Image: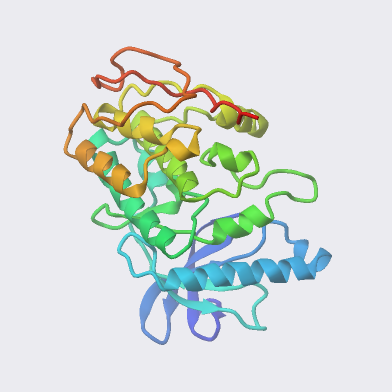
Amino acid sequence: MGRVVDGRFELIARLGGGGMGLVWRARDLALHREVALKEVRPPDPALLESDPAAARMLRERVLREARSLARIDHPNVVTIHHIVDSEEVAHPWLVMELVTGGSLQDRLAEGSLAPTEAARLGRGVLAALRAAHAAGIHHRDVKPANVLLRADGRPVLTDFGIAALRESTSLTATGELVGSPDYIAPERLRGDEGDPASDLWSLGMLLYVAVEGHHPLRRASTLATLAAVLDGPIPEPRHAGALFPVLEALLTRDAAARPDVERLDALLARAEAGAGTVDAGPAPAGRGGTASGAGGGGSEHTWRLGAAPPPPSG
């Protein structure tokens, strides 16, 4: 028998992990079913010794968000069955449903998605975000690795609240940024805490990568990527097809100009149906054009994104 956590969950095999801890396939010995276990820990292991009060605050924050998430019953949100938080464990463990279809990151390693397929997936992720936002939870780290796929292809958004811990400890003692900046909304890099619109930027970038097969703002170094996210031009997508207006609506650096979830769901629904001339609405002031022409795999729109919003007046 492998290691047993909390006298109940037997670790079977490691599924993945990173700076925030490891994820395991495990067996629930009480209910005789397989689950996923994640040990949540700060990216800087020295935090427990160097600043116990900060470590305790971060632990409480993660547990608070995990408990909030556990109250959400939605097919596109990962289900949390149980939280292990006792003196016997150094860090909390989250016991979650086991989603067996791999991640969107795994799927994209095999090739890009068709626009209609990406739109369908986007609607599922948006539904998860809508449920979380209604519960007062911002994801803060929407990216392909955090979108799991059920056997039938339906997306399941995971790692809610984990990003809150990463955000609170985003700088190590050496000043190094923890995690990839690729999907962070520009307003968060400028110091804003972010709101639901920040998650929508991340969703837009995820959809761009899904149909184009590459990240438009990724550079050779973290600092260069951060600079590109802040104000680098976003190349016009060439394979977006009916998804073109969705990307244009989401990837504006003016957070207030991004559509709300109802409008975005309508845009995605039309893109899923293959409507290639969806009206994304007028371009807000401050959007700089970086490309023109038909673009977008036949869309009649002109790509109007790329520039940062103008500085506030006064």
Name the residue located 67 percent from the left edge and 83 percent from the top edge.
87
**Extreme-front residue of the structure:** 314
Left or right position of 225 against 141: right
Nearer to the camera, 218 or 60? 60
Using the image, determine if residue 248 lies above or below residue 6: above
| Whether residue 98 is situated above or below residue 122 in the rendered picture | below
Quarter of the image where the C terminus is located? top right
Let me know if residue 242 appears in the view: yes
State the image coordinates of residue 213 (x, y, percent, origin top left).
Answer: 39, 31
Left or right side of 138 for 299: left
- Residue 163: x, y in percent? 56, 55
Q: Nearer the viewer, residue 7 or 46?
A: 46
Residue at (64, 28) in percent of width and height:
224
- Say which of 292 and 207 sits in front: 292
Q: Residue furthest right?
A: 50
The answer, for residue 109, to whether it is visible in the render is no
Residue 227: x, y in percent?
Answer: 63, 29
Residue drawn where x is 43% and y is 65% of the image: 135
Q: Quadrant of residue 296?
A: top left
Place residue 223 in its image quadrant.
Answer: top right
